[in-house]
Image (tube, rainbow, N blue to C red):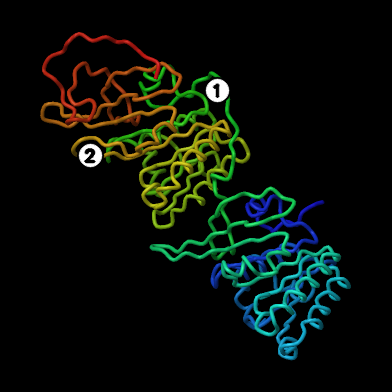
Amino acid sequence: MKRLSTGLADLDLILGGGLEPGSVVVLTGPPGAGKTILAQQICFANATAEHKAVCYTTLSEPHDKLIEHLSGFPFFDAAALGSKIEYVHLGDMLRDTGKADLGPLIDEVVRKALDDQPVLVVIDSTKMLRDFVSDHAVRMALYDLTSRVAHSGAVLLLLGEYTPEDMQTGVEFALADGIVQLTHQSREPNDRRGLRVVKMRAATHLNGTHTVQITAGGFQVYPRVESFLPETVAPKGKRVPSGILGLDALMGGGIPHAAATLVLGPSGAGKTISCLNFVAEGLARGERCLYISFQDPGDQLVDMADTFGWDFEAARSSGQLVISHVPMGNLDLDVLASVIRHGLADGTTARVVIDSLAEMAHAAREAERFPAYLRSLVGIVRTASACLWVTSETRTFGPMEDPLVGLMYLFHNVVQIRYIEHCTQIDRALNVLKMRNSRHDNGMHSCHITDNGVTVGNRIEQLTGMLGWSVLRDCPTTPSHDDTRTVG
């Protein structure tokens, strides 16, 4: 049976394909979580002149006030009111009910469902029915309502500010085919909203709490990336040029296909410029590239690339290059993953850059979740047969520290850029710290920022402090050296 789309592709994905016609779905959450906006967005996405959406309100806000609040969202269509969307206020019927019976109210809802054949029936809020009749009466009324409306084929959406205790004992949840829980967590600098599918019969839904944002565009949900199970990617054997002069020779001919590369280095060492090198090489080869930046806005990156002779503006205008700048205050792991997932959806993106991972982990403030998140993110990029280039900042002064303790194994390749004391000046040195299943050069090489971006020079024959116990320094003597290359 074809499922009813919510109008939000990512929400349909989370629900296992949408909403099943004739099903009963409870949408629960605290005030401000987005219940009414989501329900109305689904109504406007599905209602037609032949099959309306009927919205019943109990003692919630008046209809004119509800319409006023909805009018600013792009999904709202004033012409649909009455012809496609019908609002019915049940307040008077509830007041007349007293403590006796909800039968007349239920009969009216069922009659309209059977006569008009709506695509969707919304009751906002179902929990308020408990304020007018006994628990037994509510139980019997809801059983009658859900069983009879199901024959109309309409999706019955029940909204309410239910507590966790209500979810354990309420008859609504026992009768429901689906339970969608919205959450609202206060935190600085931005509050966090979430969506979790507790139950969805006859569907394989995505587990976990998924990020929700309510913006001027309406209700948006971003699937939790750990819910996906990326396919295993078999290496194709070909090498991908990095775009950094001299680096490919150290990496056995370039980056292995669909590999994740991590570039470590202190502030100012050239990590962002290495990202530009990597993207410029892809653009020169006609590849589509996605650049995720947390500090530098798109225009600033375009200007920076222009100083090296790379025309990123033309590539951005043509759609060959997509730059997504995510301000640190707005950074959310699920939103970021959705940007990358949608950027890879059509299979044309060959290179993905994230600059930088340390900022991403710090701003997200989800340390316990981050390892599983990063593993899934790397898997999604690899499944799309794209190469991932990620930077992460290390300490500028003092002993080097590992910024990704316990997570380095997630990356196939690790390249390290460090400062080096050379007599009375500070230079840069680069080495390939790790390559999985590939031969690579183990030596430390000079590194410079030139008119060609980051470039790798000659091997430095003698250094002290290479493992981070002290600052890197040139030694006055040049001993013999074994130029052996090993498998990392």
Q: Nearer the viewer, residue 174 or 409?
A: 174
- What residue is at 27 percent from the left and 41 percent from the top? 267
- Give the residue at mark 1: 235
Q: Residue at x 57, y 63 (%)?
A: 182
x%, y% of residue 302?
41, 43
| Looking at the image, residue 353 lies above or below residue 106 | above
Question: Looking at the image, which is closer to me, 119 or 373?
Answer: 373
Q: Quadrant of residue 201?
A: bottom right
Q: Where is residue 248 drawn, in percent x and y?
A: 40, 21
Q: Is residue 462 left or right of residue 243?
A: left
Instruction: Tell me if 98 is positioned left or right of 262 in this view.
Output: right
Q: Residue at x 83, y 79 (%)?
A: 107
Task: Count every numbered label the image shows and give the total.
Answer: 2
Residue 165, label in figure: none
Circle 1/circle 2 CB separation < 8 Å: no
Three-letter amino acid code at the position of disc 1: Pro
Disc 2 secondary structure class: loop
Q: Is residue 320 left or right of residue 389?
A: right
Pointer 2 residue: 396
For label 1, the SS is loop
Indicate left or right for 369 with 31 as reference: left
Residue type marked 2: Thr
Label 1 vs 2, first from the N-terminus: 1
Spot occupied by residue 364 in the image (x, y as percentages of width and height): 41, 52
- Res. 120 visible in picture: yes
Q: Nearer the viewer, residue 472 or 399?
A: 399
Give whichever of 445, 298 is nearer the camera: 445
Crowd tier of the residue under label 2, counting other residues whose Cα lies within 10 Å: few below 14, some 14–19, many 20 or above: some
Name the quarter where the C terminus is drawn: top left
> What residue is drawn where x is 38% and y is 44%?
303
